[in-house]
Image: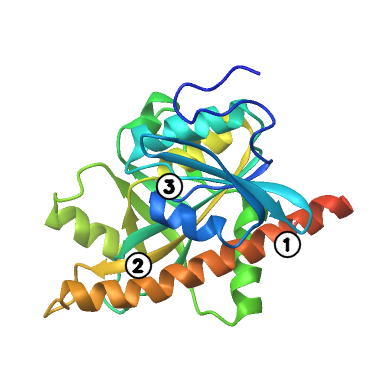
Amino acid sequence: MEIQKHIRCKFGDVGEYVFIPGDEARAEKIAERLENVVLIARNRAYHVYTGTLNGVKVSVCSTGIGGPSASIAIEELIKVGAKTLIRVGSAGSRQPDMPIGSLVIATAAYRGEGTSHAYAPAPFPAVADLRVTLALMRAAKYLGYDFYHGVVYTRDAYYVQDQNLNEFLRECGVVAAEQECAITFILGSVKHVRTGAILATDSNIWLKPQPSLEEKEKLFRVAEKRAIDVTIKAVEILIEEDRSGKKDIL
């Protein structure tokens, strides 16, 4: 029952299903979609809400920007009972033909950051839970939303662009660049919990000319809402599967 140092929660404060956006404002948007929602704690970048979805306790916790901040939130959420954690994030499109405002369901992450390497050696893959990933895909299809899926690039230095690496990632089919998927997926493996991620794209380094910031933000807001829609539906799917005791993946 000990209060966690950063998220300021104890066992019983959060549900087994947790939405983990980076942005505090996005956490609030997700929380508004829940029933009987209560603000549990607000400390630094960590804003925690708990409510219900289809009669089941679920929670939202913002994780801040980057691996170190996200790892703290995920570690502490797991300590107080979280078992399924889904990142609802933003990313930059990394294929030339991907428009800004796309949805990306991440299946795995290229570990270009540092935090995940404190948990597992470099050869170990950062892979999303298959059941969570399929639930996200089913939810997107149910809602009629187009989406991309595949490997994303997780990095630390937001403003650093390595042209050779960018070209390699493009040639390998990496769909987006972001900052938290690798540590989310690695912690899923190390801590034996289910993790997944859906991202809304807010930029694309390959576009010429580049749209204005206002144009990018307008496209992103539509995609952000859709990402939230998909994640809500995916959690409903997972809740139903878990209630039924479904064991098979397909």
Residue at image position (20%, 44%) is 157
Q: Which residue is mark 3?
A: 181
Residue 98, quarter of the rendered image: bottom left
Q: Closer to the camera, 21 or 50? A: 50
- The answer to whether residue 196 of the structure is visible from this angle is yes
| Dot placed on the residue nearer the N-terminal end, 2 or 3 | 3
Residue 52 image point, x, y percent: 71, 52
Mark 2 residue element: strand
Residue type marked 1: Ile
Q: Is residue 55 above or below residue 194?
A: below
| Dot placed on the residue nearer the N-terminal end, 1 or 2 | 2
Residue 166 image point, x, y percent: 21, 58
Residue type marked 2: Thr
Q: Closer to the camera, 147 or 238? A: 238
Q: Residues within 10 Å of mark 3 (few under 14, many from 20)?
A: many
Tell me whether circle 2 and circle 3 mark residues in contact (CB < 8 Å).
no
- The answer to whether residue 88 of the structure is visible from this angle is no
Q: Closer to the camera, 65 or 45? A: 45
Residue at image position (30%, 33%) is 114
Side of 49 relative to 235 (left or right):
left
Mark 3 residue element: helix
Residue 215, quarter of the rendered image: bottom left
Residue at image position (54%, 79%) is 145
Residue type marked 3: Cys
**Residue 237, numbered circle:** 1
Q: Is residue 230 above or below residue 235?
A: below
Q: Is residue 89 above or below residue 95?
A: above
Quadrant location, the N terminus: top right
Quadrant location, the C terminus: bottom right
| Dot placed on the residue nearer the N-terminal end, 3 or 1 | 3
Q: Which residue is mark 2?
A: 201
